[in-house]
Every structure is written in structure tokens, then in C-alpha cells.
Image: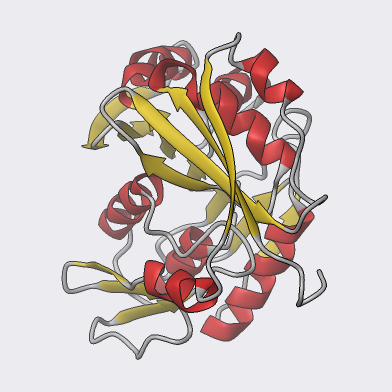
Amino acid sequence: MDGSSPLLRLAIQVDRDHAELVLTELLDLAPAGVEEVDVSDVLIEYAVYGAPGELPSLPDLEAAAGGALVHVSTSEVAADWAQRWREFHRPLVLGERLTVRPPWEPAGSTPLDVVIDPGQAFGTGAHATTRLCLELLLLEGSGADGGIGTCVDLGCGSGVLAITAALLGFAPVIALDFDPAAVDATAENAAVNGVSLDVRRFDLRAEQAPDADLVVANVLATPLLSWAGLQARLPPRLILSGLLVAETDRVASAYAARGMTLVETRVDGDWAALVLTR
């Protein structure tokens, strides 16, 4: 993009009942990432950024939502957007164990200090669904050097879950994502954090995930429902997130039909994560 070109923000507001459908389509149209804002109890706003001519067209979104889009707007981002963008990405601190921070923030005081560049893909992990996964992953890991099992991060995004798993002692850790930008970002972030990951491009709609003691999948309900039927052998333990609270019963039932038992549901606002065992 030409540095002289204005940066535009395309915002789409949709009711929560259709939010997952719109988000799924929008991530296909704009895989570099989507900003999410809670507008009200009934509305969610998704936004993407780009130069004129780079922003996605919306017919697919309107079809996915069944005409439920309530407002679409485009605005020019202020000249100080870069600094404001940095201020938006603050460190995430979970208790006394884990800090997840962008590279311009100083190191945290916790034993686990994860550096994630939000400019590469999908933010730094502050979204509720990622935070829930991190909380549950911390419960799974001992913090010892190895010996606590293998882990697959299904839909790795920027790699925050896979990197945290490796720092906790899971080995090997395999990070999978369909988006090439996410694969590249995860590999780069792993190098910055000094961990070894097996990072691969992967389509959960068509491929079998590698066997592992633990699979962490922070995606969306629709692909998780598909994966429940597609995967020939489910792992002993699963952490599933990217779910709206209203979707948890349906997802848990799909995995119960495959012999998985729901052992914990953790909620943060409208979002939830599940732990299941076989």
C-alpha cells in the first residue's frame, strides 16, 4: 500500500444471532484479521482495515446473514492510527504465570512471557476466546521441561496457544492453520520466543489432524461441528473455543456422540470454551 494512501475502516454491525456466520465469511474475505467490538447487548461490530480498493465486497456477508446486517459504514482512520493501534494492543496477564504482550511492551514479571506481533495475524491473544483457551491450557501444563504430552493447536492464528504449550513443556507441539499468513506468523513468533514448533498448513474440513495427547482448537462452532464427524480418531483431551455460549450444547453433543465427555465449560461474556475427555 502506498504510504500516502488513506487507511479506511470498513465496519459491519450485525445482531448476535448471525454473528458467527458473518465472522466466518468475513475471515474468508479478509484473512489478515478482524476487529470485534461489542456495540450493545444485541449487536456486534466487525471491522477490517485497508486502502481504497483493498477492502472486501459484501454480497457474501449479506447472503450469509440472511439480510440481517443492520449497518455498514466506511470511515477514514485518523492520522495517528499507528500509535492508537499500539495503545489498543495491551499485555494480557493471567495470574502470576503468563504474560502475552506485543514486542514494544516490556517483559512481564511472570514465569511465562510470550511475545506476539499483532501486525502479522489475528492479534495478541486478548480476545475472550483465546484468553479462555490460555486459562485452560495453563491448567493442563505443569511448566516442566517436557514429559507432559504432545499438543496440536488447530487453527493456530498468530501461534499464541502453540507457543504457550511449548513453554509449558508440551512436546512436540504441532501448529496448524489453513491461512498461509497465519502459518508464517506462527513460525516467526515461535522463533522470537525461542520455541520449536512443527508449523503446517492444514484444512480441518478435509484432512486428518495428527494424533496428540491434547488438541486445542480456537476456531468457530461450524468447523468444530464438521471436525467432530470428520476426524477418525479424537484425542484423549480437547479444549474447544471460538464458541458463543448458545452454541455450547450443540457442540458438546456432537463430541459426546463420538465418545467425548464434557468435563468443564468456561465462560467469558458471550463466549465459551469447553474441555472434553475421551
Whether residue 117 appears in this view of the structure is no
Above or below 219: residue 55: below
Q: Quadrant of the N terminus?
A: bottom right
Q: How many labels were placed on the picture?
A: 0
Q: Residue at x 32, y 34 (%)?
A: 271
Residue 55 coordinates in the image, percent (x, y): 74, 46
Residue extending farthest to the bottom is 106
> Observer-nearest residue: 182 or 14?
14
Above or below 275: residue 2: below
Q: Residue at x 56, y 56 (%)?
A: 122
Above or below 199: residue 271: above
Residue 160 coordinates in the image, percent (x, y): 49, 64
- Quadrant housing residue 101: bottom left
Q: Quadrant of the C terminus?
A: top left
Left or right side of 271 for 260: right
Q: Residue at x 36, y 80 (%)?
A: 113
Residue 125 coordinates in the image, percent (x, y): 42, 59
Identify the colour scheme used. secondary structure
Q: Residue at x 51, y 27 (%)?
A: 71
Whether residue 72 appears in this view of the structure is yes
> Observer-nearest residue: 258 or 87?
87
Residue 118 coordinates in the image, percent (x, y): 54, 68
